[in-house]
Image (cartoon, grey):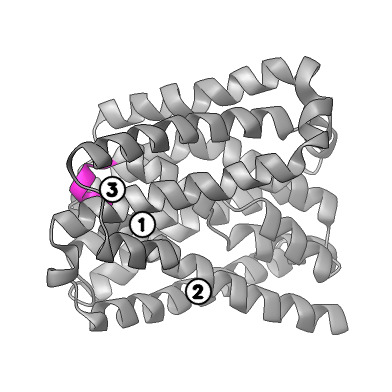
Amino acid sequence: MGTVVLAALVPARGAAFQLVDGLAVTAIALLFLLHGLRLPRAAVLQGLGHWRLHLVILGVTFLAFPVFVVLLQMLMPGFVAQPLWAGMLFLAALPSTVQSSIAFTSMARGNVAGAVVAAAASNLLGIVLTPFIVMLLSEATGASVSLAGVGRIALLLLAPFVLGQILRRWLADWVEKTRRITSFTDRATIILAVYVAFSEATNEGLWQVLPVSDILRLAMLSVLLLALVMLTSGGIGRMLGFSREDRIAIVFCGSKKSLATGIPMAKLLFAGSMVGPVVLPLMIFHQIQLVICAWLAQRWARR
């Protein structure tokens, strides 16, 4: 949020913008290279046996979320501006978070092993599924997504990730020893990408056309969407007879959306002037999901 304020007050322009834009693209490729280096294949293969759990979580993440957003837009078409609805759809198409999904599942005494595998699978599939879900529904939202954007996703996200998995054989120990450095890279990439996105949005006059009331409505919409998804995921878990531990993993993994994956993807998928309005719903939803899920995890842990 501080970076958004900075970009609104001191946006990058001209040669400075070209410089930070190039740095952001390079940082995004590096981020996914590190993701590939950090993800142990053995842990993923070991947990794939609980396929029913993973299918439910993936169904909530990539199917229920977009359906709810489309229904909300049909019921409340003028509730927020059209570019913000495009951002809500993009949010709905994103994969789950990794760290917070696992952390909240652990805090609530759920199936942590299942959460690890589900979150990892969600992020891997999201590299492929997210752009195509957005493309399929782009006409309904007015978003402009092209095949060129999908190609950039493959080049700057998927290719570095695969390279990281290949290099893991030699560099896995180094990555484990330098987790502080790689964690800093994650945060720095997000901050840089946010600054670039909102610098361009500021230069295009976003804050002159986006009233405060729209931001408040976005927050209300985010709370409603999160409530719908959490109630649905919990209900599906009970209906299919999952254990309490599995239901906790379904709720926390299925209801999250990844800021670390979403902002780089938005930068690659959408036209420059669209990126700011598109990632704004994601940033608001991300903060709300952390607050609500932290409270819920503590409550379930006490039970």
Asked if residue 271 is among those painted magenta in the image, a careful observer would answer yes
Q: Which residue is mark 3?
A: 137
Q: Does label 2 or label 3 sit earlier along the sequence?
A: 3
Which residue is pictured at 49% across the width and 29% down the height? 29
Q: Residues within 10 Å of mark 2 (few under 14, many from 20)?
A: some
Q: Which is nearer the eye, 243 or 260?
A: 260
Which residue is pictured at 56% across the width and 56% down the height? 60
- Which quarter of the image is occupied by the N terminus? bottom left
Instruction: Give the label on residue 228, or none.
Output: 2
Question: Does the magenta stretch mainly form a helix, a strand or a loop?
Answer: helix
Report how far apart the C-alphas of labels 3 and 1 lie in the structure: 17 Å
Instruction: Give the label on residue 279, or none.
Output: 1
Q: Which is nearer the eye, 193 or 51?
A: 193
Q: Residues within 10 Å of mark 1 (few under 14, many from 20)?
A: many
Q: Position of residue 171 (x, y in %)?
A: 77, 21
Residue mark closest to the camera, 3 vs 1: 1
Q: Which is nearer the eye, 71 or 156?
A: 156
Is residue 170 shown to the viewer in this render?
Answer: yes
Q: Position of residue 226 (x, y in %)?
A: 51, 72
Q: Which residues are magenta?
A: 270-275
Q: Does label 2 or label 1 sit earlier along the sequence?
A: 2
Which residue is pictured at 67% across the width and 40% down the height? 182
Callout 3 secondary element: loop
Within the image, what quadrant is residue 176 found in?
top right
